[in-house]
Amino acid sequence: MRHSRKAVSTVLVAALLICVFVTMFIFTACNKKGAIDMTNPMAFAELKPGSYEVSYDKDGNVDGYFLKAEKDMPARTVNYEIPTDPEALKELAYALYQIGNKTMVTVPYASYFETGSNSSALIMGDSVTELPLIFNTVDVRNNLTGEHFRQTLQVTKENVEFEGFLGIILGPIMSALSESGQRWYVNAPSNICNFHKTTKVKSDGTTKEFDWSKDEGTKDFESKRYNISVNAIPYTASGYQGKINGQDATEANVNGMQWVYDEETGYSIPTYIDGAGKRISYEKTDQHIFFSTGDDANKYDAEGNLVEEDYYNTITSATVEYNAEGGYYVVHMVMDSTKEYTHLDTNWALQDNKGASDENARFTKLEVTFELWDNGYFKQWEMWEDWDAPEAHGIAHMTANQYYLTVFSYDEHDAGINKYYSVG
């Protein structure tokens, strides 16, 4: 009896969606599935910071670079002996990760370019509708001025063919609704945060162009999404450079961490405090990566209570290698997707009505491989992230497999916010 009800429900949903499909048909038919331009805009990505000089033409544009002599190459400041013990490997992987994080907010300029893909599936009975998305993100920050700009564009992969009755109906609708652009401009010292969102996309058949004049702002946002969108991003360093709690940003340890009590969770959250007493916590991923052992001073919160280590230790396994010829570490980490802390700041976005609208939606996989220059800068980043929503919007089962590839630059030219956004 239960199965027959599900079948009737599926038929009713399909009938309703046919009506929706008719109203959307003209729009989707005109919306060409061209490819977004995924060209890397950063001239100096994957060049070791401090290893090159830049030459400019008469108009001030970069026309080339040349590597410094061997004797002038940047010194290796991150120098670890790689252990074999699995627990020690996890702790080292986390230490290297935090060194890269701290560098992002303490050097004068830090930028990254990220490409990604999202292969999601909508499952209704025996019908599976797949929607492959591609997206790119440009993130540039000027830590001297406390300015930060991020733009993310998402479109459907070109030449997608939808199959099956529901696929032919749902696919074009999902595709049209999924294409969007979002961008933020933050000036932390002035507490300015400008947020724009648009779903107006033009295509010439080969590239996608987003129309920011059709800004939808924070229309219909959930309260938490709204607050994130309109408040200055807290990990912008606002000009602070040099040392964190008396230690260099690239120094090979993580003792600059302090524990700050968080009323919402009832736990003390690990964060960093700069020389002016400002919290500047930053993680490359919105998911939380953490691992630590022992009862040192970092294990106590502001009230002197011992931190419950198991709540925070989210790394289940790790490998670390050092590429001596290239001068960088290669770190792979597998995260515990069952830990609340791992997805503390992201799971809600799956569960609210702008996500899957399913209180049981959760992330099921998080793996990271990153490269870190041996003078303390992120070089490259890869991440695999899966999620599952058994009752998305109360009508279907949804799953998604996501992949990200990121390259980094620390050159002033690449951090020119005005190349992407008109400030003021």
Image: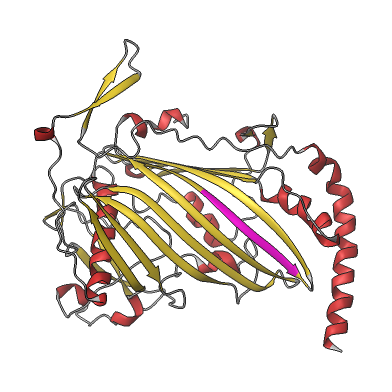
Residue reaching furthest to the top: 58
Q: Is residue 301 visible?
A: no
Image: 160 above or below 53? below
**The magenta stretch spans residue 262:** no
Looking at the image, residue 348 sits to the left or right of residue 1; the answer is left
Q: Position of residue 382 (x, y in %)?
A: 42, 54
Q: Position of residue 404 (x, y in %)?
A: 48, 53
Looking at the image, residue 49 sits to the left or right of residue 190; the answer is left
Q: Position of residue 135 (x, y in %)?
A: 56, 46
Nearer to us in this view, 336 or 270:
336
Q: Which residues are magenta?
A: 116-123
Quadrant of the rendered image containing residue 272 = bottom left
Q: Residue at x 87, y 89 (%)?
A: 1
- Quarter holding the C terminus? top left
Nearer to us in this view, 193 or 134:
134
Q: Position of residue 164 (x, y in %)?
A: 83, 60
Q: Residue at x 22, y 82 (%)?
A: 305
